[in-house]
């Protein structure tokens, strides 16, 4: 109702009306002021103020900060700022979050290794922690640092680090053999004699994590359950990328209709079903007393000892199943792609010759590469694969747990820190002028030794990947065994992967790189090769002796 009319009926005198007016307009101004402040805060302010002394990237806009100017390839834009402006460390705004990005090797060492306790924490994200991880708990790699994260990390380390490699040998033997023989069979069955190696790398990496977690594996790369699990875990991983989840940084977007949230809920439900299925398979194998040792089984038999509870076990399994398979397969695929190039042909011969020098003959080498890594030329190949093709370019972020001093600058508690492995691993000031070239020989050069952590693909410091030893062994083993028996050649039409560390990736919006599709041929080193048959037969027999849950 109109104010004047209302005043008339209420018998208000003009001074009352004026007074009422003043109160109302004061109230309206306060409300409008508050709304304007809220909008201003959301549009321009970050959780932490600018850190004095660290350069800030150009091009921030309201609400999104730098998320727009970063385009579709965040690590490459950060790398460009790093090299063109000489910014080994820079700060940016991801929506409301203030973030620091590390582009330089020396600087990453100083922040993540030297100040390991200050940078051990991880930030929380709305989509990943509130939606995707609601039922199974968050993974180790996305958990803030606390007693539970410490317990879970210690438990997985027992299965992944160097001392555990010996007990993993039968499984590593089975998977690397299946990889080599099935890849070869696929080339034989193809009209042109070539194969897309993607599914073979994915199955190998996924089976390793399934064996570690649940004592089970997939035999057939066409198994619909395998394809569905790979699809689910890959979708879950997509919720970690800085590129595809603006709602994590721009809180207002959470209140708008959001297709990603619906996908997150559906994916979580599907994943819960198969995780429960895996869990009960182990439980019933344990009940029957015929069981393949695995993390779930060991932890279930220890449950009640107060070490870990069921939610810890679930979180560990989710961490391992989602942590490893895409990174391992990406590294392998990129490496295979490079091997098919002209330079790769030359290096393949070096690997073969070195394996024979070290182990004496093909059969001995086939057996020994499961348990040791004595061929330096092969070690140099996988080290360069890991450095050059960082499978995750912008690593899962850290968060500072306390203030610390760096170069006279105070870095505040609570800031998100991203290691840009793509830039760090190609830092010319550390690796030299040829850092942008794939050159395994750099790891053999005694005049220019490369120090720990060698490269940042696994991160570094106290939250570094706990699976470094097993991943290294797997890469050494798979590539040694393949190159012992075969030459990796370009596809029948002569095409090869563009094995450049940025261009090889088909989707820069994902957290993990996905190499563009390519095909290879395999040429047996010796025709009618009885050594190959003997090697395959011994590993096949090993696989048949194993029990699976
Ligand atoms: C080429 C292979 C791999 C790469 C490049 C890789 C990379 C990474 C990176 C970058 C991190 C974060 C490190 C940091 O913040 O400093 C990480 C953490 C982790 N990775 Fe891996 N990883 C690989 C293989 C695996 C495998 C095979 C598994 C399990 C079977 C695994 C399990 C984990 C776990 C559990 C964490 C969380 C550690 C924590 O936050 O404390 N990773 N990995």
Image: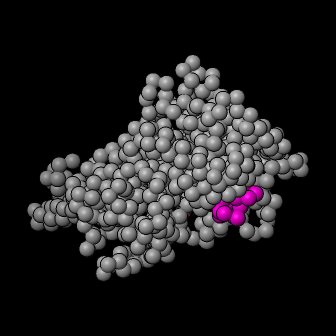
- Residue at 77% x, 38% y is 534
Image position of 4 with respect to 163: above or below: above
Residue 221 visible to an observer of this rendering: no
Residue 310 appears left or right of 83: right
Residue 458 appears left or right of 287: left
In the rendered image, residue 209, in percent from the top left (x then y), is placed at 65, 49
Q: Ligand 1 sits in which quadrant?
A: bottom right
Q: In the rendered image, which quarter contains the C terminus?
A: top right
- Residue at 79% x, 63% y is 302
Residue 64 appears left or right of 523: left
Q: Which residues are magenta?
A: 157-168
| Residue, far right | 289
In the rendered image, residue 279, in percent from the top left (x then y), is placed at 74, 48
| Residue, far left | 14
Image position of 264 with respect to 382: above or below: above
Image position of 506 with respect to 459: above or below: above
Structure colour scheme: one colour
Image position of 277 with respect to 197: above or below: below
Q: Nearer the viewer, residue 35 or 390?
A: 390
In the rendered image, residue 525, in percent from the top left (x then y), is placed at 62, 35
- Residue at 33% x, 50% y is 76
Q: Nearer the viewer, residue 164 or 146?
A: 164
Residue 359 visible to an observer of this rendering: yes
Q: Within the magenta stretch, is there residue 158?
A: yes
- Residue 537 location, quadrant: top right
């Amino acid at each position: 109702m109109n104010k004047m009319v209302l005043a008339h009926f209420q018998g208000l005198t003009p001074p009352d009306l004026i007074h009422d007016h003043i109160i109302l307009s004061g109230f309206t101004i306060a409300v409008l002021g508050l709304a304007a402040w809220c909008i201003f805060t959301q549009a321009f302010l970050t959780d932490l103020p600018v850190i004095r002394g660290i350069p800030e990237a150009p091009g921030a806009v309201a609400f999104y900060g730098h998320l727009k100017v970063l385009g579709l390839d965040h690590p490459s834009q950060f790398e460009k700022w790093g090299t063109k402006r000489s910014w080994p460390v820079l700060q940016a705004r991801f929506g409301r979050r203030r973030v620091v990005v590390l582009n330089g090797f020396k600087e990453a060492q100083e922040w993540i290794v030297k100040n390991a306790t200050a940078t051990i924490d991880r930030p929380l994200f709305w989509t990943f922690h509130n939606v995707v991880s609601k039922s199974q708990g968050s993974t180790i790699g996305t958990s803030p640092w606390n007693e539970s994260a410490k317990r879970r990390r210690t438990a997985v380390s027992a299965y992944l680090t160097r001392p555990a490699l010996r007990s993993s040998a039968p499984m590593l033997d089975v998977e690397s053999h299946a990889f080599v023989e099935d890849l070869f069979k696929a080339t034989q069955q193809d009209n042109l004699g070539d194969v897309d190696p993607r599914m073979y790398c994915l199955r190998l990496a996924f089976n390793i994590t399934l064996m570690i977690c649940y004592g089970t594996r997939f035999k057939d790369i066409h198994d619909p359950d395998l394809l569905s699990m790979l699809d689910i875990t890959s979708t879950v991983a997509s919720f970690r990328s800085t590129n595809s989840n603006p709602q994590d940084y721009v809180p207002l977007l959470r209140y708008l209709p959001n297709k990603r949230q619906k996908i997150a809920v559906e994916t979580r439900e599907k994943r819960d079903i198969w995780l429960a299925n895996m869990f009960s398979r182990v439980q019933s194998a344990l009940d029957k007393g015929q069981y393949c040792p695995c993390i779930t089984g060991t932890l279930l038999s220890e449950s009640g000892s107060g070490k870990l509870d069921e939610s810890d076990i679930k979180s560990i399994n989710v961490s391992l199943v989602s942590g490893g398979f895409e990174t391992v397969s990406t590294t392998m695929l990129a490496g295979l792609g490079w091997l098919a190039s002209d330079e790769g042909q030359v290096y393949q011969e070096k690997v073969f010759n070195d394996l024979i020098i070290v182990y004496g003959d093909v059969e001995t080498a086939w057996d020994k590469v499961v348990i040791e890594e004595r061929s330096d030329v092969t070690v140099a190949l996988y080290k360069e694969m890991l450095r050059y093709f960082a499978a995750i370019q912008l690593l899962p972020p850290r968060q500072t747990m306390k203030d610390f001093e760096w170069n006279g600058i105070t870095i505040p508690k609570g800031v998100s820190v991203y290691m840009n492995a793509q830039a760090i691993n190609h830092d010319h000031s550390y690796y030299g002028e040829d850092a942008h070239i794939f050159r395994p020989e750099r790891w053999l050069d005694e005049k220019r030794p490369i120090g720990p952590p060698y490269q940042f693909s696994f991160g570094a410091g106290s939250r570094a990947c706990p699976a470094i030893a097993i991943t290294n062994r797997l890469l050494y083993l798979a590539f040694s065994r393949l190159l012992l028996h075969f030459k990796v050649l370009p596809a029948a039409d002569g095409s090869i992967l563009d094995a450049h560390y940025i261009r090889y990736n088909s989707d820069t919006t994902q957290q993990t790189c996905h190499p563009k599709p390519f095909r290879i041929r395999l040429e047996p080193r010796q025709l009618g090769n009885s050594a190959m048959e003997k090697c395959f037969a011994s590993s096949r027999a090993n696989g048949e002796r194993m029990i699976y849950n």
